[in-house]
Image: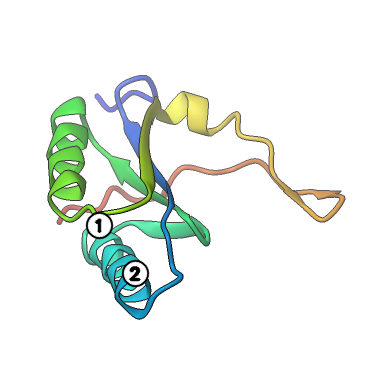
Amino acid sequence: MLSGYRLMWIVVMFDLPVVGKAERRAATDFRNALLDMGFEMSQFSVYMRFCSSQAQIDTYCNQVEKCLPAGGKVNILQFTDKQYERIISFSGKSKQPANKSPDQFNLF
């Protein structure tokens, strides 16, 4: 049985230098690699992905590590689906509806 305490989310947050052309290219390549891995952009430098287990989280952490650019800072957060449901979001001063877990579990 799938439990909201076993289903996980992985969040990759980053602050990458984009002063030079090579740095901009590296940042774009990193963003595209995250998208290719199935992450969705939550904010410009924040990407999220739903995972079915800690083993899947570990796999994605290793994949992210392999495509890290040379400069900047990258953080990877992990939390349960139940914790995800408790995120409070605002757009401007308007509170947004609570986050909802995906309706269907996708197999990749």
Residue 59 appears left or right of 8: left
Q: Nearer the viewer, residue 45 or 41?
A: 45
Q: Is residue 74 above or below residue 87?
A: below
Q: Looking at the picture, which amino acid does disc 2 mark?
A: Glu
Q: Secondary structure at mark 2?
A: helix
Disc 1 designates what residue? 69
What residue is at 21 percent from the left and 48 percent from the top?
64
Residue 50 appears left or right of 87: left
Q: Looking at the picture, which amino acid does disc 1 mark?
A: Pro
What residue is at 25 percent from the left and 57 percent from the top?
69
Q: Nearer the viewer, residue 67 or 105?
A: 67
Residue 4: x and y, percent? 39, 25
Disc 2 designates what residue? 23
Mark 1, residues whose alpha carbon is within 10 Å: few (<14), some, or many (≥20)? Answer: some
Residue contact at pointers 1 and 2, CB within 8 angstroms = yes
Residue 8: x and y, percent? 33, 31
Q: Is residue 87 above or below residue 21?
A: above
